[in-house]
Image (tube, coloured by chain):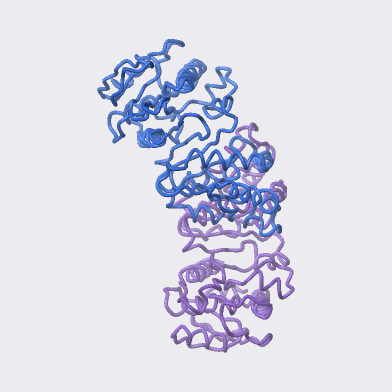
Chain colours: A purple, B blue
Amino acid sequence: MTDGAALKPPRIGISPGDPGGIGPEVIVRALSKTKIPPARYILFGPRSLWEDEAKAAGLKVDLIPWKADGGLPEAGVFFHDLSGPQVPTGKGVDDSARGAASFSWFESTVASARRSELEAVVTGPVSKHAWSLAGLPWRGHTEYLERFYPGAVMSFWSDRLTVALLSHHLSLREALGRVNPEALAGFFRVVYESAVGKTEGETEILVAGLNPHAGEEGLLGTEERDVIGPAIEEARRAGLPVRGPFPPDVVFRLAFGHPEKIVAAMYHDQGLIPFKLTAFESGVNVTLGLPFVRTSPDHGTAFDIAGKTPADPGSMAAALRLAVRLAGCR
Amino acid sequence: MTDGAALKPPRIGISPGDPGGIGPEVIVRALSKTKIPPARYILFGPRSLWEDEAKAAGLKVDLIPWKADGGLPEAGVFFHDLSGPQVPTGKGVDDSARGAASFSWFESTVASARRSELEAVVTGPVSKHAWSLAGLPWRGHTEYLERFYPGAVMSFWSDRLTVALLSHHLSLREALGRVNPEALAGFFRVVYESAVGKTEGETEILVAGLNPHAGEEGLLGTEERDVIGPAIEEARRAGLPVRGPFPPDVVFRLAFGHPEKIVAAMYHDQGLIPFKLTAFESGVNVTLGLPFVRTSPDHGTAFDIAGKTPADPGSMAAALRLAVRLAGCR
């Protein structure tokens, strides 16, 4: 990406997610019915999928074909027509064909971003079960991205709280093993470098302890004294604004209402219990540590309501807005 | 205790906590300035301590001497004058003398409850550090009570959320070892028997998993499948309304706003992160599994403001109200 490109509206590639879920619907609704900032939004996937979805939602979306080699400097909604697996129609079905299709659209979107044709990727929700039925080895988007970018970090952003996870889909017992100097050093660096200048207010990292009361000077665990504390000192010596370790049941209160104070959580539920309790409707999942931005709404395919009840595009709109904000500062 | 005694206002023994902290002050303020239900509130500790505290707060508290052998059927505020360590005066000091004094007053209050002279004990906050300086082997109130009642359970109650902890002051690594069939069976039984009929609405126990996504059928940990799930089944066969295991980042959202749905948390921070984030001001710490009720406010000694800034009696008032409610149903 040249410096000149930053002056144009950012290019936000959007993958539909599972065609049997609410992903395509909330994308179409978010683009046509909610307040989103100017950008070049590019819908990946078969044209017919987007047209059918807009029709079902009673919305008119003008789709302009996208050319990756430029020539489209203006903000708007474009589409990148993908061939590949035939589009399965019908909602609420969790099957192999839909799993294969949603993966291939996501794969194409990521490939485009990897070719620097996009500044950000926003993903509709996929079905982990359908991916598994389709024989795919990845649990979801993040695991696929980790294949290319092993230092990627899963994080969650809302207006009130931002959390980054040292590890995510591991048993709690395995997650304890990730609390080591090398992993912490990379984690702090990725979180800081991905977020600095993009939070409202001065970016800071507040580190949660692993044990009750942050170990209480070794009485309730030694990781804070022997591993986490020294890793924080090391990061501070390198100039990173990292503080802690704080008692886990205190740090989220300190950070609450200050989304610029990113809580570095030592395991999946330490970060996600407070995040989901306080920010479910507006939550956005952000993968940090990639050469492009990647966001997604904090909800699943909702097969139970897909095609029956109109789906709320709020979280998808938040994912689009955050993608533009994070991409705009690149 | 005879059945007849239940018709009289419950006897709530109150220990002052650390005399250098805000405990005595919030007790005096809560008893004289907040809305609390009729009960026989009995202040343990030296009379001079209570008189000085009321004077410092500019409050008039009429203290009636308490006779443990009865003869005081009416609601009111009484005192049980304790000799023992001399009362250290002066606020904001964290020392051995104050630690020894706060312990001896608490010990006397518990001894009275153990003689069935009280239906409930409410404790002002003590300093763990001062107890340690005084050579006491217990971290705090709960650990002392566990000496007599090894099956005691630490729980936290607010208007919006109730959580009970399978273990509390253990490192996270050690806490994993507590997730075993015997501990879970006792935990579910104690929580249910202590709470049934005392929550507003039908008491139910929602069990959190230990691992992300409650282990996801063994992919992210096996404790749910091998230990927690079977323990829940066993409890249900015994007639207990126990459900789960739920994904940890989901169960608190299910229970939020329903304090009658008690979340059974598998370790300290799993329960306390969401509790402290959402209920700090009104939170009450309740020890379950004792032959009497024990509550305390969810704050510490606040040495930094003690004697300088008027302390908020809200959490102490909530602790007194909850003690009366829990005791009244005994």
Q: Image point 29% across, 34% down: which residue? A: B34
Picture quarter with the N terminus of chain B: top left
Q: Quadrant of residue B12?
A: top left
Q: Image point 57% across, 22% down: which residue? A: B132
Picture quarter with the C terminus of chain B: top left
Let me know if residue A120 appears in the view.
Answer: no
Position of residue A33 relative to residue A229, above or below, is below
Residue A272 in the image, given as x and y percentages of width and height: 56, 55
Residue A2 in the image, given as x and y percentages of width and height: 61, 74
Left or right: where A240 falls relative to B48: right
**The one of A55 and B202 positioned closer to us in this rendering:** B202
Position of residue B268 relative to residue B19, above or below, is below
Left or right: where B251 falls relative to B22: right
- Counting every numbered tag in the picture gives 0
Let me know if residue A18 appears in the view.
Answer: yes
Left or right: where B263 falls relative to B46: right
Position of residue B225 relative to residue B280, above or below, is below
Farthest residue in the front direction?
B3
Residue B253 in the image, given as x and y percentages of width and height: 49, 55
Left or right: where B53 falls relative to A20: left
**The one of A167 and B324 positioned closer to us in this rendering:** B324
Q: Image point 48% across, 49% down: which residue? A: B261
Residue B2 in the image, given as x and y percentages of width and height: 41, 25
**The one of A259 and A95 positioned closer to us in this rendering:** A95
Q: Quadrant of residue B69?
A: top left
